[in-house]
Image (cartoon, helix red, strand yellow):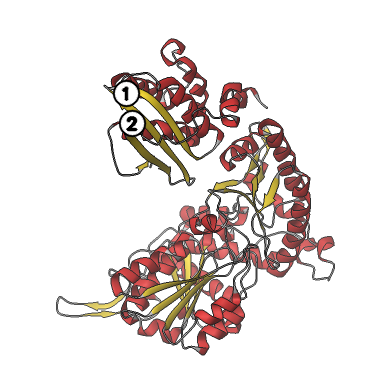
Amino acid sequence: MSEELRELYQEVILDHNKSPRNYRAIDDANCRATGKNPLCGDSVVVYAKVEDGIIQDISFQGLGCAISKSSASLMTTELKGKTIDEAHDIFNTFHDMVTGDPSVEADADQLGKMVVFAGVREYPARVKCASLAWHTIEAALRDQKDPVSTE
Amino acid sequence: MTTLGPSLVSSDGRFTDSFDVDAVKAEFPVLSELVHGKPLHYLDNAATTQKPRIVIDTLRTYYEEYNANIHRAVHTLSEKATERYEAGRGKVRTFLNAASVKEIIFTRNATEGVNLVAQTYGRKNFKPEDEILITAMEHHANIVPWQMLCEQTGAVLKVVPISDEGELDFDAFTQMLSTRTKFVSVTHMSNALGTVNPIEKMIELAHSYGAPILIDAAQSAYHKKLDVQALDCDFLVFSGHKLYGPTGIGVLYGKEEILRTMPPYQGGGDMILSVTFEKTIYNDLPYKFEAGTPHIAGVIGLGAAIDFLNDLGLERVERYEAELLAYGTEALKAVPGLTIIGTAPVKASILSFVMDGVHPHDVGTLLDQYGVAVRTGHHCAQPVMDRFCIPATTRASLACYNTKADIDALVFGLKKVAEVFG
């Protein structure tokens, strides 16, 4: 693989693609939303159990590429235990990173593990893959009923 | 005219000897581009084909030497533009072997052709409970216009199923036809699977129930020789940009006697004989369906693309591509975990496939690094993906300039994909 491609498909991403974390339904979830990317037909369902404004449990299921699956997987590990406000801030930071200027270095302190998705900025066609689960959890936490679309 | 040299136009029976693919390829400037420092292997032809030099030059000459509006002014440039535009129509007529240039309507693309027929013929003729028959392998362009029409008229859309190989269930087609069937609209060749439908028999059967039939030739027109009189289809559509021509230009063929009965599609200039606020008289065929200034350069460029294809000889292109498809089908067997989607006995030019544990988007991004351009996704045929219970496929699609080296590069890249994600 080229250096550029290794930036996109980092080991962490390949690992989460192969063994996605929290890949299950939550039977007593009180937040749930479906996200679809009409461009590629990908679809993700995210579940969250929120108590007193804190995300006690979070999971996902669905079909997608390595970028979208690993992004969803890492997102669940990142957001568990966070408040809704914190989750919202992380979403904004993540979103700014994947849609941002590739020449500006991503802030690893703020992004934690999610910084592995900084390489996506070089691949405009793949930004929606990385952000699908995030848009979906935003909708779930707002308790939206309509399916989310990245279009 | 093109200057492809005698090796391409000789008509001896030994096709592969006489088809000099390197000479063909040399006619396409973009094919010498590098992608990520690698030679381009363009295998996304079912989405759009590259343009030969003759088409590019023809477009440039039009804009540099005789750009003018047509069917209007008496000045020299306008007369020349009009003459070349109508010559383009003549070339399309010959290309399809239509009976008259009145039967050749220029549209933006194949999609607009289907919409035109649905909104003029369909809206005028369909009543509640009338049935429109399509197949389960249609492109969205041959589904959605009919769904819209059904909402408007109360007509009902019926879908003929396909087999696990991606072949039309012909028995089901026969059984679903009835006196309620008021229209049949089918693809000649599936863009997602490569399946070629037995349209000759389908046209005959549809007519035996009095139903007109539209052939979506978007995928077949650049692979197969078409003869609308021999086929006896009522309508046929294709897009110029898949036929080595410019984007933004398409063709609707319709039988003259049916086109005459159809109301206009859009109103405007060029489609009228006279306009007063009391009454407007519509123009004759084919202008009745061409409102406003058309894509003049597009038509002239399409004419050049047809000249190019005629020089190549579509029958010879078809045989060359069949050989390359067989080579590719065999070569893909060397890739671990790869399954071809669409294995109908009669198919052409398309290798659609899935790989164990790897999403097509990842396949596409990796292949791009090796200079291999493929399409990944649902190919505007989501019902086909649903039929095979998959979200998407990777699709390599062939054209006249592709070589075994392109297939080899594809297989090389796919083996890397299997290594990285396996």
Comes first in the chain, label 2 or label 1: 1
Quadrant holding the N terminus of chain B: bottom right
What residue is pinned by disc 1?
A: A88
Residue drawn at (58%, 63%) of the image? B190
Q: Is residue B366 visible?
A: yes
For the residue labelled by badge 1, is the local secondary structure a helix, a strand or a loop?
helix
Q: Quadrant of residue B258?
A: bottom left
Which chain does the residue under circle 1 lie in? A
Q: Position of residue A99 (x, y in %)?
A: 41, 27
Amino acid type shown at disc 2: Glu
From the top left corner, tell me how far across and down residue B246 is, in percent: 51, 56
Q: In front here: B420 or B62?
A: B420
**Discs 2 and 1 lie in a common subunit:** yes
- Which residue is painted at 43% across and 20% down in the image? A78
| Residue A55: quadrant of the picture | top left
Disc 1 marks a residue whose amino acid type is: His
Between the C-alphas of marks 2 and 1, the distance is: 7 Å
Q: Position of residue B278 (x, y in %)?
A: 14, 79
Left/right of residue B228 with respect to residue A99 in the rendered view: right
Question: Which residue is most to the front?
Answer: A28
Q: Chain of mark 2?
A: A
The residue that mark 2 highlights is A138
Task: Please provide percent x and percent y for residue B268.
Answer: 28, 68
Height in image: B66 above or below B175?
above
From this view, report whether residue B186 is shown above or below residue A30.
below
Confirm whether residue B97 shows in the render: no
Q: Is residue B231 left or right of residue B236?
A: right
Assess whether mark 1 and mark 2 are in contact (beta carbons under 8 angstroms). Answer: yes
